[in-house]
Amino acid sequence: MVSPGIIGTKIAETGRVRGELADPDVEEQVYQMYRDAKWGPDRVATAIVRAVEKNRAVVPVAPEAWIMYYGKRFLPGVFSPLFRRAMAKKIGLGP
């Protein structure tokens, strides 16, 4: 499983935001996160090659992907709700 995190590509601009997040302002914030990303597709490709060489099944790439991986692994009942709340706040949906 490859978990790239937020990688600097145009994927957000070619996709659509649905559900509670379907709002032009929220979409712009999502697009901006991808435009500001520090890692590019080359980093994902390198991580995948290393994972294949080392026979690893899970491939987190960007720092937020590693945080999610370890958080969900060691504190699953705590981390997932906290992360969802933090993301909602970041994009203007929470307190």
Image (cartoon, rainbow, N blue to C red):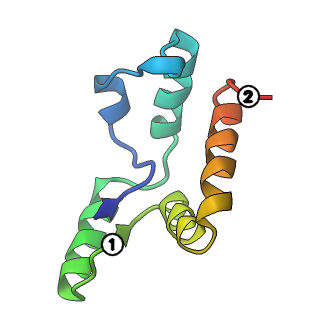
Residue for badge 1: 58
Question: Which secondary structure lies at badge 2?
Answer: loop
Quarter of the view holding residue 29: top right
Residue 12 shown left or right of residue 75 in the figure: left
13, above or below 1, in the image: above
90, above or below 64, in the image: above
Label 2: how many Cα within 10 Å (few below 14, some 14–19, many 20+)? few
Q: Position of residue 21 (x, y in %)?
A: 52, 21
Residue 94 shows which numbered tag? 2
- Which of marks 2 and 1 precedes in the sequence? 1
Q: Residue at x 57, y 14 (%)?
A: 25
45, above or below 84, in the image: below
Residue 78 shown left or right of residue 22 in the figure: right
Q: Residue at x 46, y 28 (%)?
A: 31
| Residue 42 visible at all | yes
Residue nearer the viewer, 64 or 95: 95
Residue 42 shown left or right of residue 19 in the figure: left
